[in-house]
Image: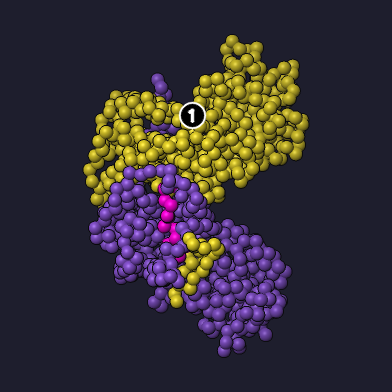
Chain colours: A yellow, B purple
Amino acid sequence: MKNYDIAVYGLGVMGSSLAKNMINKGFKVAAFSKSEAEKERFALNGKEDSYVVCSTKEQMLSSLKSPRIIFLMITAGAPVDSVIEDLLPALEPGDIVIDGGNSYFKDTSRRYNDLKEKGICYMGVGVSGGEKGALLGPSMMAGGSKEGWEASKHILKTIAAYYKDEPCCTYIGPEGAGHYVKMVHNGIEYAILQLIAETYHIMKYGLNLEHDSILGTFENWKNSKLDSYLIDISVTVLEKMDEDNTPLVDKILDVAEQKGTGKWTLEEAIDRGVYIPTIFEAVFARSFSSNKEIRVQGNKHLSHSGSPYTLDDYEKKLGEALLAGVIASYAQGMALIAKASEENGWKIDLSELASVWREGCIIRSVLLSEVKESLTEEKENLMLSEAFHYITKLEPALREVVTKTSSAAIAIPALASALNYYDYFRMEQMPVNFVQALRDCFGAHTYKRVDKEGYFHTEWEK
Amino acid sequence: MKNYDIAVYGLGVMGSSLAKNMINKGFKVAAFSKSEAEKERFALNGKEDSYVVCSTKEQMLSSLKSPRIIFLMITAGAPVDSVIEDLLPALEPGDIVIDGGNSYFKDTSRRYNDLKEKGICYMGVGVSGGEKGALLGPSMMAGGSKEGWEASKHILKTIAAYYKDEPCCTYIGPEGAGHYVKMVHNGIEYAILQLIAETYHIMKYGLNLEHDSILGTFENWKNSKLDSYLIDISVTVLEKMDEDNTPLVDKILDVAEQKGTGKWTLEEAIDRGVYIPTIFEAVFARSFSSNKEIRVQGNKHLSHSGSPYTLDDYEKKLGEALLAGVIASYAQGMALIAKASEENGWKIDLSELASVWREGCIIRSVLLSEVKESLTEEKENLMLSEAFHYITKLEPALREVVTKTSSAAIAIPALASALNYYDYFRMEQMPVNFVQALRDCFGAHTYKRVDKEGYFHTEWEK
C-alpha cells in the first residue's frame, strides 16, 4: 500500500493539472479532495496504475511512502489553516506538507514556524504558469523547510518547466520566502501588463493606427529583446476576432479589479521603503479603472490643451520605451526582494531566482537571462548593472514617447514612472534639501549638511 | 481643591505649549509629567494662580472638576497604552481621556473601544500647527467619544486657531476618525512640500535662475491663490543665509527619512484602493533620497538625451502648475478620507473638516475656503467640482511644465503625477481593456464587455 510518491490534496483546475503532470512524469500520486465532484472528475486515461483517488484523508496518508509528502493545492487563506488543522493529528514528525497556492507570505511564515515546532516540514511553494503550466511544467519557487525541499526536490524539479536542461525550480529561502518571491513576481507581472497595455493604447488612441498595423508591430517585437510570453499572447489577443469579425479586444470593458498579490507587493514596498513606482501605477490603474462613471463625467468636465500625437519610427521607439519600462519593472521587483531578503535574513540568491523565471511562469522572457546575469554583478540596483547598461540606448526613445504622449494628453503613468525611475538614479541632487529646510522651519525636524557631519537645526525666522 | 478645568499630562514641547495656551485663555490647568525635569521646567510667569504642577497623578486627578478631563500629550505608540494602563485604576465612568499625539488611528480606535466598555470617554484628537500652533492656537480634529467632545469642546474650541470668528476645531467622527484625518492631513502636507521643492528645483537646476529671482518668485506667489503657510515659510527659508552669507538651503543635504504618517496614509490608500499618486511620490522621494551614494553612482553610469530647459513666463506657469498640483493633492487626500468614512461608517463632514484646516495647521492656505466650498457640492471627487473648475485653466501650464521638465531630464514625479491624475479623470477609455484581455488569456480571469452585461471568458488560442 505505502508505495505512492506524493499526495495531491485539492483537485481543482490547478491541483488536478499538477497531479497529472506528476503522473505523466512517472510518479505515483495519491489524489484527494474534500469535494466529491472534484474526485469524481479526476481521471487520466491509460495511467490508472499510477494514481489512486482516495476516499478519505486517512487513505491518502496511509498510501504514501516515507517521508510522506502532501502537496496542497487549495484556496489560499483560511482554507489552508483549516486543512492543516484537520491533517495535523494524523501527521508525524518528518512528514512534508507543501502549500502550492498563492498564500500570503506572512501566513506561510507563521505556518512554517508553527509546524516546525511539531517536527513537520512545511513548505510554501510559489507556482506560476496557470493551468497549462501546472500540467506541462510550471516555474516553482520553493520556500520553507530545507529538509522538506531535500526530500521533495526530485519530484518538484522533475515536474517543473525547463530552460534548456535546467529545471525552473529552486529553493529560495526559509519561512515564507517562496511565496514572497511569487508575490513580487506577480507585482512585476502587473507592471509589464500595464506597460504593454499603455503601448497598445498609444498606438490605437494616440497614433490612431489600424488594428493590423498594431498587430504587425507586436508580431515584429517577437523578434526582439521584447520576446516573451506576454508579447506572444498580446499577438494572440490581437488576432482574436469577435462574432462580428471586429477585434474582440475592442469589446472588452476597460474596468478591472486588483486582488491580493499586487496589493501585498505595495504594502511590502511601503513597509521597507523600496520605491516601486511602475508596480504602484499598474496596481492603481486597475483600481482607478473600476469607476468608469467618474471618467465619463471627468471627460466632459475637464478640458485639455493636448497637441496632436506624432511619432516617427513608432515601432522602434515604442518597442524601446516598452523594453526600458520592463527593465525598470524588474529592477524595482528585485530591489524589493533584495531588501526583504536582507531584513528577514533569508539569503535569497537573486540570480538563481531569475533563472527559475526563464520558463514556465507568466513573466518568462528572453530578457530574464540578462536579469540573471545582471544580478551576479551584485550591484545595488539592476539599473546600474553592466548587463543592462544598454538601457542608456533605450532612454532617448522612452523620453520621447513619454513627453510626446503627455503632450498629447494621454495618461501613461507606468511608462512615465519608468522614465522618472531612470532619472531619479541620475539625480545626484534631488529637491529634498528644500523639503528638509521647510520641515526644520515648521517642525524643528533638523537636517544634515553637505559640508559637516551631524544633525542641525536653525531658527529660520530670526 | 477640585477646581481645575483640565489636566495636561506630558510637558514636553507640545504639552507645555498647549497647557500655556489653556492657561492664557483662562482655564485652570493641572499639569503633570512623569519627567521631573519637564515638571521643574514648566512655568508661566504671572499666571501662577491658574495652574498647579502636580507631584503625582493622584494629585492631578483629585484636582479636577467633574467631569474630569485629562489631555495626554505624550509620545505616540506604546507610551500611550502604558499611561492609560497606569491611570485606569484611578479613573471613573464619565472621565474624559484625550490623546493629542500623532497616534496611529487603529490604536486610537482600539483604545476608544476598550475604554468605552469601562465607561471612560476616550478621544483621539489630531493637533496640527507645531509648537507655535500649540501655544497660540492649533487646528484640532477631534475623534472618539461624542460625550467627551460635548464635555470638553468649550476648552478645545477656545484654545484652537480661529479663521475669522470660527474656531478651527470640530468633532470629526467616532473611534480613530480624528487621528485618521490628521494622518491624511500629513499625507497632503508631504505632497505639497514635495511639489514646492520640485518647483524650486526646476527654477534652480532647470532654469538656472539666480537665488534672488527664485526668492522673488516665491514672494510674488504670496499674492496669489498659492498664498499659504508653506509658501510663507518657503520665503523665510530662502531668505536665510548661512554664516558665509550664501543661501543656507544650498548647504542642506538632499536626504530625508519618512516616518509614520506618510507611510500609514499610503497603506490606507492601498487597502481601500484609492489612488493617491502625488502623496505616494512625495513619501518615496524621501525614501529614495536616503541612498545618496547610489545616485552619485547612477549619475556617472546613466547618460541622458535631455534637451536644455527653456520656459517663458516661468513665474506664471510654474505657479499655475504648482497650484494644480496642490489641488490634486487635496483631491487625493479628501477622496481617501471619504472612502474611509464610508467604509468605517464614520460620517465625516468633509466640508467641515476643510474648514478647520483653514487656520492653525501646516497646510493652511487661502485655497482651503475653496476646498470647503467644493466639498459641499458632494461630487465624487474634488477634481470634478465647480469650485475647482478653474483647474482647467491651470492645466496648460501644468502640462507644459511637466513635459518640458521631463524633456530636460529632470525628474519631478509629484508634478508629473498631478498631470497624470488630471488626465486619468479625462480618460473615458483606459488601456485596462488590453490588460483584461491578457489576463483572461493566460489565467481565465474573465472580463466584462462594453455591449453586454456579465462576465465573459474566451478560448483565445483557438
Graded by Cα atoms within 10 Å as few (under 14), some (14 to 19) or many (20 or more), the crowding at tag 1 reads some
Q: Which residue lies furthest to the top in this view?
A: A46
Task: Name the residue located 57 percent from the left edge and 89 percent from the top edge.
Answer: B46
> Residue A430 magenta-drawn?
yes
Q: Can residue A462 be seen in this view?
A: yes
Q: Looking at the image, is A265 positioned above or below residue A447? A: above
- The magenta-colored residue range is A425-438
**In the displayed structure, does residue B180 sit left or right of residue B61?**
left
- Please, which chain is the residue tagged with disc 1 on? A
> Residue B412 magenta-drawn?
no
Specify the quadrant that holds the N terminus of chain B: bottom right
Q: Position of residue B159 (x, y in %)?
A: 50, 77
Q: Looking at the image, is A225 positioned above or below residue A302? A: above
Q: Which residue lies furthest to the left in this view?
A: A308
Query: In terms of secondary structure, where does tag 1 sit?
Result: helix
Q: Looking at the image, is B362 positioned above or below residue A327? A: below
Given residues B308 and A317, the one toward you in this image is B308
Q: Where is residue B236 in the image (x, y as percent from the top left)?
A: 40, 71
Task: Name the residue located 64 percent from the left edge and 27 percent from the top edge.
Answer: A71
Q: Is the magenta stretch mostly helix, strand or loop?
A: helix
Task: Name the residue located 31 percent from the left edge and 45 percent from the top edge.
Answer: A403
Specify the quadrant that holds the C terminus of chain B: top left
Given residues B331 and B226, the one toward you in this image is B226
